[in-house]
Amino acid sequence: MTHYQICTQCVMDTTDPDLLFNNQGVCQYCETLKIHYENTIARTDMQIAADLQSAAALIKKRAGNAKYHCVLGMSGGVDSSFAADLVVNKMGLNPLIVHFDNGWNSSIAVENIKKIVTKLNIDMLTYVIDWDEFKDLQRAFLYASVLDIEMLTDNAIYGATLKIAKEQKIKCIVSGGNFTTESGLPNAWRWDKLDAKNIKAIHRQYGTRKLKSFPIYGPWKFIIDRSFRNFHYFSPLNIIHYNKTTAMQHLKNQFGWQYYGGKHYESVFTKFYQAYILPVKFGIDKRRAHLSSLIRNLEMTREDALLEMSKPPYDDLVLKQDIDYIQKKLELSADEFKKIMATCPKKHTDYPSDYNLFMKLKKLNSLINSMKK
Ligand SMILES: [Zn+2]
């Protein structure tokens, strides 16, 4: 049996198979990210305001006379909601909000988006995915027993956002992604979101219908968009000292925004995936990584994080209701679902994958970018 160890500063433990500890029992994330957090926390309001203004000036210059300065994907969760407020009220930008509807958005998330878009008086476009196709993909991934079922949504959000940006001639892609609350997520707990070959291969093996409209996005499209179409990617939350606790309070006060109970729980499926499928089938509790980033950002003590980890990720009654709901929506019988949960996990690379190609293309992209400078 592998030796169990937990970091002395955060709550990451050896359920991440790649976790390393120094002599003081501190994990590599706490050690390598320390400087980032210290630098972020030390920045003054004046520096932050100046950086936001110069970023806004650059985005406006690139946009020229276009109606929208940028496109911003919004889930109704805290990060993207806060980013929308920031780009409008602190940067003076006019974003086109893109909301991705894969059939799993919670009503709280949808209400949150409405409240923010209405009060900020900005335009929104909802990208509705073909539910029968998406259901077929999710079922295929469940049958394939691979870890990252959520790469389907992430891949499609990427593809849909870029598609809309091209249609609307928008050059800047803004996201609520941020280093502060999302750093330190182990590679072993996710898969490359742009591995289109993997998605197609798994669907070919376990799917039952043709994919006609799924906005699949792979490494070739990525490299063309990134290197030759001059898309500019911007994460405003990385400029400020982002603090999730104060961001939530701000959203509640300003917009009547509501919390939905956990990181990425704005989607009913994501909640079920993170709080049930991942811990039960794969032995992974993503709360560890999320809470650890809050500890590093001085938003939470290690004691409070340990207390949170001691609670089950699901309330028993809610779990029973959610299992029923998920089975019904994905048209799986109780037996089929039990069988899926009992099947041994498989690696994404047990199926054809773009992974090696993607690594090579990333290196090529860095080379192109370094030559541009
Ligand atoms: Zn740590």
Image (cartoon, rainbow, N blue to C red):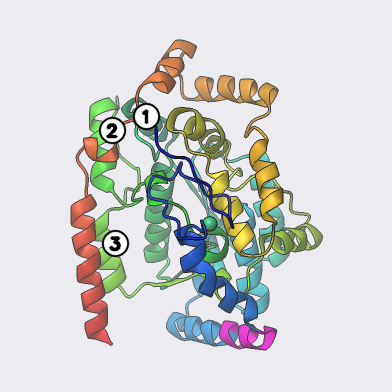
Residues under numbered marks 2 and 1 in contact, where contact means CB atoms less than 8 Å apart: yes
Residue flagged by tag 3: what amino acid is it?
A: Phe
Helix, strand or loop status at disc 2: helix
Q: Front-most of 231 and 262? A: 262
**Is 71 in the magenta?**
no
Q: Position of residue 87 (x, y in %)?
A: 60, 73
Residue flagged by tag 2: what amino acid is it?
A: His
Drawn side of residue 86 relative to residue 172, left or right: right
**Is 51 in the magenta?**
yes
Q: Position of residue 128 (x, y in %)?
A: 48, 44
Q: Which image quadrant for residue 349?
A: top left
Q: Alpha-carbon distance for marks 2 and 1?
A: 8 Å
Residues under numbered marks 3 and 2 in contact, where contact means CB atoms less than 8 Å apart: no
Q: Position of residue 295 (x, y in %)?
A: 63, 59
**Residue, disc 2:** 203
Q: Which image quadrant for residue 371?
A: bottom left
**Residue, disc 3:** 222
Q: Alpha-carbon distance for marks 1 and 3?
A: 25 Å
Q: Is residue 228 visible in the rendered structure shown here? A: no
Helix, strand or loop status at disc 1: helix
